[in-house]
Image (cartoon, grey):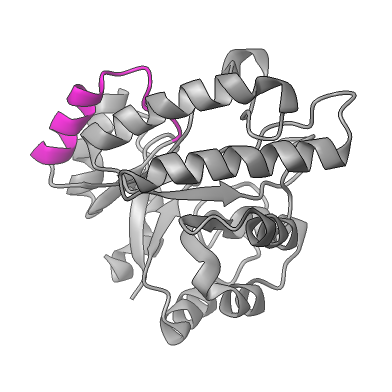
Amino acid sequence: MPRFNANLSMLFTELPFLERFGAASRAGFRGVEFLFPYDHPAEQIREQLDRHRLEMVLFNTPPGHWTEGDRGLACNPSRHAEFEETFERALEYAAVLGAKRLHVMAGLRPRGVNDAAMRAAFIRNLRHAGARAATQGITILIEAINDRDIPGFYLNTSAQAFDLMHYAAVPNLAFQYDIYHMQIMEGDLAPTIEANLPRIGHMQLADTPGRHEPGTGEIHYPFLFAHLDRIGYAGWIGCEYRPAEGTEAGLGWLRPWL
């Protein structure tokens, strides 16, 4: 049966961040993820994880200057030093939080840089991150994001991600398969997941259009969940959606699975 974890950057946002852990636990979740932990001391987050017996499933590496438009650093050839420095900060948080997965954000395509240079930069940074993360038993993940939600994002399709993974040849690198993004960009969800299951290290979900909870859009999630059971997916699925009418009100779809 699929294991669902709460994305605390999207769910329970009616509450302050540190209060969302308890809300997730009371709702039946046993794991959590979020975009970034860096606005809070790692020890405060660890306290919430321990108090509510939650597993720290995943968070993102620092994205650069988020408020100024950065969405990651890894594909930018001019920011290698910044990437390596901020990746160390992610590792420090991961050590305290017990996280075994880190999403390395590819970033926006920098102006004036050709595709070959971006690809080389991304592969170089993935190799560095993979080697550093391996010292803590951590898997690094890359995610393809649709070009409507984040125009100009470097990584957009599963085929592009799997090609990069092949040439990077990083043993502890896996794909973060986001069902919502991949439905928008390529569809063909069930066959793609099945064909590439060994390379998928984490999954996320939302329905489309709207990026709301399953059952509000076009994706036939009951079929997809049964398919994941049939093919033996044993990882987590992060609930990374915007509740249509409040988090608690929108959890009905999840009750049979918790």
Q: Nearer the viewer, residue 25 or 238?
A: 238
The answer to whether residue 121 is seen in the rendering is yes
Q: Is residue 49 above or below residue 160?
A: above
Residue under the image location 52 percent in, 58 percent down: 174
Q: Residue furthest bottom?
A: 230
Q: Residue furthest top?
A: 68
Residue under the image location 74 percent in, 41 percent down: 120
Q: Is residue 120 above or below residue 213?
A: above
Q: Nearer the viewer, residue 160 or 257?
A: 160
Indicate the quadrant where residue 104 lies: top right
Residue 141's spot in the image, x, y percent?
A: 51, 50
Residue 203's spot in the image, x, y percent?
A: 48, 59
Residue under the image location 49 percent in, 75 percent down: 222
172 magenta-colored: no
Task: Report the number of discs.
Answer: 0
Q: On the rendered image, what quadrant is the C terminus found in?
A: bottom left
Residue under the image location 73 percent in, 27 percent down: 77
Q: On the rendered image, what quadrant is the N terminus found in?
A: bottom left
Q: Nearer the viewer, residue 178 or 176?
A: 176
The answer to whether residue 103 is seen in the rendering is no
Determine whether, in the image, residue 64 is placed left or right of residue 47.
Answer: right
Determine whether, in the image, residue 224 is placed left or right of residue 9.
Answer: right
Q: Which residues are magenta?
A: 35-51
Indicate the quadrant where residue 158 lies: bottom right
Q: Is residue 172 above or below residue 39?
A: below
48 magenta-colored: yes
